Amino acid sequence: MDSLITAAARALAAGDPVGALKRISLRDDPPALALRGIAMAQLGELPRARELLRRAARRFGAHEELAHARCVVAEAEVALAARDLSQSARALDAAARALDALGDRANALQARLIAARRLLLLGRLDDAATALARLDARGMAPSLAAVAELTAAELALRSLRTGAARDALARAHEAADRAGVPALLAEVAEARAALDRPAARRLFPGGEQALRLDEVAELLASGALVVDACRRGLRAGTVWLPLARRPVLFALARALAEAWPGDVDRQALIASAFRTRRPDESHRARLRVEMGRLRALVAGLARVEATARGFVLKPRRARDVVVLAPPIDGDQASLVALLSDGAAWSTSALALALGDSQRTVQRALVELETAGKVRSIGRARARRWLAPPLTGFTTILLLPAALPLE
């Protein structure tokens, strides 16, 4: 490796992409192409970065397996930053194995960290936890250690283990400080700030109370019957009843919980569950059917009893009933939560992360764009979606597949 390539690599490692480009911007050999790609990624020019890294990988070819594998890993990280989640994980896994076999442990760890972060972004928390547990952190470079601890902290936050998240963030700050990379320190600071922001709202008649993540965890562990509108389900102690795929039942449960200990009249329940202001006899018949289904579903947690004017929720074992609402209102709260990270998302990546069809996501994005909550850049297949960062609160509980407490 010549002196200019070495100097450019050192500049990139120190977070100085402009200094790196000053040395290699006019060169077109494979090592220079790879370093130029990394520099463009650090400057936020992600499409150009991917193009350069792909060119470098092709130019290295099979005869330079180590350099080729490093380019694959770098491109995978750029794809993650660009929120391109459609790529198969096989190429990245093959690159990690090749790097291990060739003795490049640091880049093999980087590849596995990218894979874990991708799983986390997709909401596959169990798989992400397994991937993180398999990492051998001994002798890990400070920058890699900081990324690993940040990933562990986000996993803990998504699982509402706030104590573990604080410990991981403290280790991440220490590692980022040793690495001396300002971007890493800023990322750690932002993650720490999320712990002190409101994460949800506890609703009660006549008002609401903002709750931090640790307060949400305490509430869920209290044994109260919690109607969780962040993750669309019911919790009491260790029992979790997901209702994300049964919106009518969840709407009925929420309406009953908001009125507890009082009852809710039938007209209000029909309006809440069926979105109509002019109910007829068919709606009243359907309400009876859906209430029967809800009664059977929650039988172990509460009774749903008919009253003269409607229905009332009566929890078992003298439990309180609590409604936990998202920090932001609207049917597209999870979509807004994903977009609030400041990255530019494609429709296909959003659909993958949310588990919805692209058409459903497209309709939601059009509604949000009309309301001025998101904006798009590019056209056709290159179109990407952005939303302003939500700095007043954290959207951890709204992200895909947030785990109930075990």
Image (cartoon, helix red, strand yellow):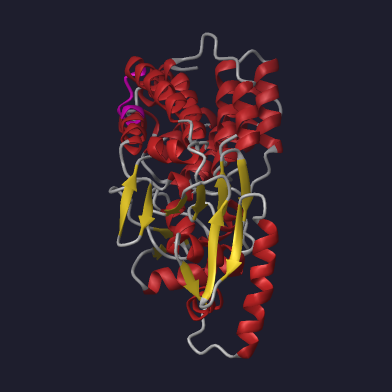
Residue 78 spot, x, y in % from top left: 50, 40
Q: Characterize the magenta stretch by its predominant secondary structure.
A: helix
Residue 269 spot, x, y in % from top left: 52, 74
Magenta includes 376? no
The C terminus is located in which quarter?
A: top right
Tell whether 390 sits left or right of 343.
Answer: left
Residue 102 spot, x, y in % from top left: 67, 15
Question: In terms of depth relative to the viewer, which is nearer, 183 or 146?
Answer: 146
Task: Please indicate, yes or no, whether residue 358 appears anywhere in the rendered image.
Answer: no
Residue at image location 54% in from the left, 31% down from the top: 30
Magenta includes 183? yes
Task: Please indicate, yes or no, whether residue 87 appears anywhere in the rendered image.
Answer: yes
Tell whether 124 sits left or right of 46.
Answer: right
Most distant residue in the front direction: 308
Residue at image location 42% in from the left, 16% down from the top: 142
Residue 140 spot, x, y in % from top left: 50, 13
Question: To which quarter of the image does residue 305 belong?
Answer: bottom right
Residue at image location 40% in from the left, 31% down from the top: 24
- Name above or below for residue 259 compared with residue 265: above
Region rendered in magenta: 179-185
Most distant residue in the top direction: 139
Q: How many marks?
A: 0
Residue at image location 56% in from the left, 78% down from the top: 274
